[in-house]
Amino acid sequence: MQDLAVALESITRVHGVRGAMVVSVSDGLVVAESLMEDIDGAPIAALTASLATRLRRTTEAAGRRQPTFLHLRADTGTVLAVPSSGDLLVVAIGEQDVNVGLARLEMLHLAERGI
Amino acid sequence: MRALEPWVEAPLATFLAESSARLTLLMTSAGQVVAQHGFTRAFDVMSAAALGAAIMASTDELARLMEVPAFHALSHQGAHYGLFLSGFDTPRGRWIGLVVFGPESSLGLVQLFFQRMVADLVTVAPGPEPTGQVLGEDFEDELNASLRTLFGQ
Amino acid sequence: MSLVNFTAREITCKIVYYGPGRSGKTSNLQYIYSRVPEGRRGRMVSLATKGDRTLFFDFLPLELGTISGFATRFQLYTVPGQVYYNATRKLVLQGADGVVFVADSQARRFDDNLESLQNLQENLLGHGVDIRDLPIVYQYNKQDLPSDLILSPGELDDALNFRGVKSYGADCLSGNGVFETLRGISELVLKRLAAGSPVA
Ligand SMILES: Nc1nc2c(ncn2[C@@H]2O[C@H](COP(=O)(O)OP(=O)(O)OP(=O)(O)O)[C@@H](O)[C@H]2O)c(=O)[nH]1
Ligand SMILES: [Mg+2]
């Protein structure tokens, strides 16, 4: 767990990232988190996990196997997600000017490392 | 979906739509059904409510015995279905929600939208029901007739 | 308290069968279950140990039909009679609209009846209910046993029934008195509703 928290910090250090979480996809719960105080992780975890499940079904139905990176752009920021092997999802919440490329790299790094 | 009182319907409908729960049951802490979705037989609803209220009551009692604060919610995870059980206070007294969900939902989603439903229910709940006379004075004949049919006598 | 719904015109009442271990509480429900037409009853739920001792409760929902324009349902519960299950016994008692006290008529079980009655009073008080305010009837079960082993309903009334509530001699194996007992408590509970007592 200590280890995971350290790994999440490599994501939150990226410019524009306001929080990062590891989420269990099947139960939509937070496994580990490193979030700015004003961010409530539980609803984001539940909804992102649900979204990731649906998107996986979509890409599978299209014969494209699994999504490897989700990038949701909203009016005032972004939500990024990277499915890891097994049941876990790495999620990052960012400002509008977040460095998506670097954030994605760190998230993939964590996901591939096997959480 | 079926609710004993109309004001319960909107918050419950939102919960059902958002959480994709398969079965949902709202009951009083004594196990009386207040609203339900997904059950087909009225009698099964009553049994589920009796059992759900019993689980909740024993959990509360366990917390008291161990001198820890009451547990807000508990969940059981089966191979295909999950069960979520949680007590909450309303202007109509303490109620319990029992939710069964499948793989199209998750404990996180159920928890999230359950909390919102509780907040909605508390907001729209009218005060305690007025007390008053319920049955007519002549109920005894009807009761006797009912009991005769019940026992075939 | 009874759940009364004026919109749907439904009444639901909770009746608890209380009494010492092995007095025949579960047998009451089993007999009722066996005699009531299928469309009028639900499944009987029994949370029991292997040896058929009630662990938590038995539960039997009954559809009484329409009374004074209200669809009326009764939910029958039993408690575990064994002394060390008091915590669960107390839980089941919560919210009861009426109690059937099932006593064991055997002379050698007399003290157990008395103890259970005291325990009922205590547990009700724990829920803030005075036993004198709650509809209650007594059933003196096992009246089928040889008369030298049992006390008669009259003797049991003298020894247990201080408040002079309605009492019924019964034998749950053949079903004698079971129906009368249920009728007795039903009347008391519904009378209370008719008198306009508070409903939840
Ligand atoms: N002879 C006789 N035996 C009875 C009668 N009623 C019940 N019994 C027997 O007494 C035993 C206990 O009956 P139960 O109905 O299980 O007793 P209970 O009150 O539910 O017991 P607990 O669950 O331990 O509290 C069983 O073996 C029954 O067959 C009766 O009227 N006459
Ligand atoms: Mg029993």
Image: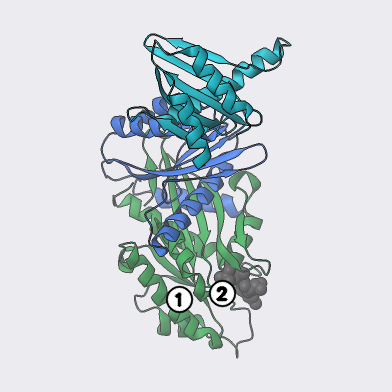
Chain colours: A cyan, B blue, C green
Question: Residue C44 in the image: x percent, y percent?
Answer: 61, 53
Give A115 or B68, whichever is nearer the viewer.
Answer: A115
Task: Name the residue carrying label 1.
Answer: C116
Specify whether disc 1 shares its chain with disc 2.
Answer: yes
Crowd band around label 2 with a 10 angstrom C-alpha radius: few (<14), some (14–19), many (20+): many
Q: Which residue is mark 2?
A: C23
Residue B113 appears in view: no
Residue B32, how many percent across, how many down? 44, 46
- Label 2 within 8 A of ligand 1 by Cβ: yes
Image point (46%, 82%), residue name: C156
Q: Amino acid at mark 1?
A: Ser
Return the chain for callout 2.
Answer: C
**Residue A27 position in % (x across, y down):** 56, 34
Of the pair C146 and B76, the residue shown nearer to us? B76
Q: Is residue C177 above or below residue A5?
A: below
Foreground of the two, A36 or C6:
A36
Determine the residue located farthest toward the right in the rendered image. Answer: A63
Labels 1 and 2 touching (C-beta < 8 A): yes
Q: Is residue A93 left or right of residue B152?
A: left
* Chain ID of residue with mark 1: C
Label 2 element class: loop
Inter-mark Cα distance, 1 to 2: 11 Å
Tell me which corner region of the image, top left, top right, bottom left or bottom right, holds residue A37. Answer: top left
User: Is the CB of the residue bearing disc 1 within 8 angstroms of ligand 1?
Assistant: no
Mark 1 / mark 2, whichever is N-terminal:
2
Q: Amino acid at mark 2?
A: Ser
Identify the residue at horizontal 39%, vertical 11% (top origin).
Answer: A96
Of the pair C73 and B144, the residue shown nearer to us: C73
Q: Is residue B71 visible?
A: yes
Could you tell whether C48 is left or right of B18 in the image? right
Whole-percent x and y of residue C187?
Answer: 42, 57
